[in-house]
Amino acid sequence: MEKQIEKLKNEKKAVILAHYYAPEEAQRVADYVGDSFYLAKVAKKTTADIIVFCGVSFMGESAKILNPEKKVLMPDLSADCPMAHMVKPGKIEEMRSRFSDLAVVCYINSTAELKCQSDVCVTSSNAVKIVRALPNKNIFFIPDRNLGRFVAEQVPEKNIILNDGFCPIHAAITKESLQALKNEHPYAEVLAHPECEPEVLKISHYIGSTSDIIDYAKKSEGKEFIICTEDGVNCKLASDNPDKKFFFVSPAPCCKDMKLNTLENILSVLEKEDKVVEIDEDTREAALVPLNRMLECAG
Ligand code: 13P
Ligand code: SF4
């Protein structure tokens, strides 16, 4: 199947992008594998005619918003991120009416409709940098309360108002399960994604995006690591560091939506070109503004 995918990809001038949470088989056939920020940059620059995005809907949507003239396909259009919808209707307008200088900062894990109402997008690898550089004092950070809280701790000079969204996969990593694993591996360094709950972050050694975690593990002289994020990152961690050990809490955090990006679905979408990401032009133009602002601010 991998050979058929390769052949079709070349014939159709397609490029395959995969997030670190996609199944190992998808990461293997992908031209680019990375975190949300890296993949957004790749999607903006690619010269391919077709982008096959092995991720979840907000990632495919962002690729389409940045690249309206390209065909963006997803191996399974139902792959969605529940957190992307977790802002109550009317909440943004309510906050804007309460603070005249409000900036709405939108984690890229959000629907195109939410992006349209926001001033700037961020990802977990650039949120601190972007929020710190904003001229506004009052920030409404949507949808993730945990990334928002982490940013607020790093940028205490801002008044960051949190929204009550969260990632169910990261929220399922409990302090108790992490502590039990720490007891089993007392020398392991704990590397956590900022989407984890605060009590997990409090007992972690390092907090960063998926690529930050991967970079940290590579550079560290440590030999054992407990990884508090989705278990798809293990492919890159293991291949970069054959002499190091990586442990995940049990049951291993698994984003079932990301796992819809199977080889069968990739081959099928390349053959049929049927799972097309579509966004109406008004929404696309409005959502492009905060996405472009993120790309400019993060450099
Ligand atoms: P990254 O910003 O590390 O790619 O994380 C995206 C994500 O969905 C985390 O759950
Ligand atoms: Fe969304 Fe969580 Fe899956 Fe990331 S891991 S795509 S935040 S549900």
Image: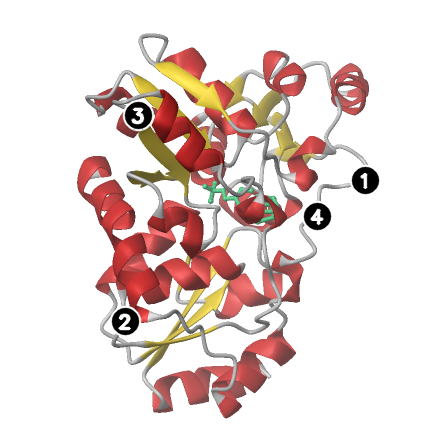
- First reached walking from the N terminus: tag 3 or tag 1: 3
Find the distance from the CA under tag 4 to the CA under tag 3: 35 Å
Q: Earlier in the sequence, mark 2 or mark 3?
A: 2
Distance from Cα at disc 2 to Cα at disc 1: 40 Å
Circle number at residue 102: 3
| Nearer to the camera, 83 or 38 | 83
Residue that badge 4 annotates? 254
Q: Amino acid at mark 4?
A: Cys
Up-down relation of residue 138 to residue 66 (above or below)? above
Q: CA distance from mark 1 to mark 4?
A: 8 Å
User: How far across and down, in percent of the image, does residue 270 sit?
Assistant: 48, 85
Label 1 beta carbon less than 8 Å to ligand 2: no
Mark 2: amino acid = Pro
On the image, the x and y values in percent for residue 128 come to 35, 24
* 108 or 45: nearer the viewer: 108
- In contact (CB < 8 Å): disc 1 and disc 4: yes
Residue on which disc 2 sits: 68
Q: Residue at x 56, y 66 (%)?
A: 26
- Quadrant the N terminus occupies: bottom right
The crowding category of the residue bearing disc 1, from other C-alpha atoms within 10 Å (few below 14, some 14 to 19, many at least 20), is few
Query: Crowding near pointer 3: few (<14 within 10 Å), some, many (20+)?
Result: many
List x then y, in percent, for residue 139.
35, 23
The amino acid type, in three-letter code, at marker 3 is Leu
**Cβ of mark 4 under 8 A from ligand 2:** no
